[in-house]
Image: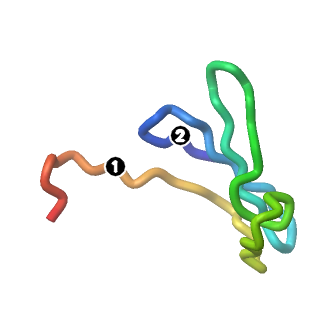
Amino acid sequence: MTFDSNQDLWLANNGSSSDLIIMDAVTGGWEYVYGINANNKNDFGRTINDLTTFRIFSNDPN
């Protein structure tokens, strides 16, 4: 799991075809965003074992 810049929590289940889930850390509301359970035809077809956040400390990332 990891937090994004909006302080939303991203989680992945570790099934053979993982789902990515986003959760609002304040309200506790969540939804499937990617994966079979998201019902949007985004199937990774592989297990996601870990998530991380890539932080940029510059206003001009180029």
Earlier sequence position, callout 1 versus callout 2: 2
Going by the numbered disc 2, the residue's amino acid type is Phe
In the image, residue 11 lies at what x, y percent?
A: 69, 48
Question: Residue at the spot x=70%, y=63% of the render?
Answer: 49
Helix, strand or loop at disc 2?
strand
Q: Is residue 53 above or below residue 62?
A: above
In the image, residue 52 lies at what x, y percent?
A: 52, 54
With 47 as the anchor, is 58 left or right in this view?
Answer: left
Q: Quadrant of the C terminus?
A: bottom left
In the image, residue 45 lies at what x, y percent?
A: 78, 80
With 41 as the anchor, is 61 left or right in this view?
Answer: left
Residue position for label 1: 55
Residue position for label 2: 3
Q: How many marks?
A: 2
Helix, strand or loop at disc 1?
loop
Could you say which disc has been placed on residue 15 in the image?
none
Q: Residues within 10 Å of mark 2 (few under 14, many from 20)?
A: some
Question: Residue at the spot x=84%, y=67% of the render?
Answer: 36
Q: Is residue 37 above or below residue 24?
A: below
With 55 as the anchor, is 11 left or right in this view?
Answer: right
- Residue 40: quadrant of the picture: bottom right
Which residue is situated farthest in the top direction here? 26
In the image, residue 31 lies at what x, y percent?
A: 75, 43
Q: Residues within 10 Å of mark 1 (few under 14, many from 20)?
A: few
CA distance for labels 1 and 2: 11 Å
Going by the numbered disc 1, the residue's amino acid type is Arg
With 48 as the anchor, is 18 left or right in this view?
Answer: right
Question: Residue at the spot x=82%, y=62% of the render?
Answer: 39
